[in-house]
Image (tube, rainbow, N blue to C red):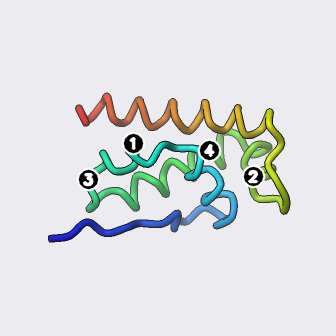
Amino acid sequence: MAEEEVGPIGSSSSKVANERILALVPAESVKRIPFFVRRHALSKTFEKIEHEHPDLYAAAAREGELPEDVREQLSQIVNGIFEQKLRKHNL
């Protein structure tokens, strides 16, 4: 069975913000998540960021380039979440 490419689809409110946040995660980290739970893992990560950091999520949803400070903060947050999840599940 071939791996599905899963985009930033989730129940979070902004597809643009989700795509920008996903772009901050190294592709090899995303590929380490089994394909059959990848969509769920991504959507829950986006929801967590949206609820815990609404100001950063809103900045990612705006038109134009992400400010460097916002990009750096989001990168640290999302990569920290991914590292925790990967460690927790021994991936």
Residue 33, position in %: x, y?
Answer: 31, 48
- Name the kind of residue labelled 1 in the image: Ser
Residue drawn at x 44%, y 48% is 27
Disc 3 + disc 4, Cβ < 8 Å = no
Pick whichever of labels 2 and 1 is earlier in the sequence: 1
Pick whichever of labels 2 and 4 is earlier in the sequence: 4
Quarter where residue 17 is shown: bottom right
- Name the kind of residue labelled 3 in the image: Pro
Q: Indicate left or right for 69 with 35 as reference.
A: right
Quarter where residue 85 is shown: top left
Image quadrant where one finds the N terminus: bottom left
The residue indicated by pointer 4 is: 49
The residue indicated by pointer 2 is: 60
Q: Could you say which disc has been placed on residue 34 in the image?
A: 3
Disc 4 + disc 1, Cβ < 8 Å = no
- Name the kind of residue labelled 4 in the image: Ile
Disc 2 + disc 1, Cβ < 8 Å = no
Pick whichever of labels 3 and 2 is earlier in the sequence: 3
Disc 3 from disc 2: Cα separation: 26 Å
Disc 1 + disc 3, Cβ < 8 Å = no
Disc 2 from disc 1: Cα separation: 21 Å
**Nearest to viewer (mark 3 / mark 4):** 3
Pick whichever of labels 1 and 3 is earlier in the sequence: 1
Disc 3 from disc 4: Cα separation: 21 Å
The residue indicated by pointer 1 is: 29
Secondary structure, mark 2, is: helix
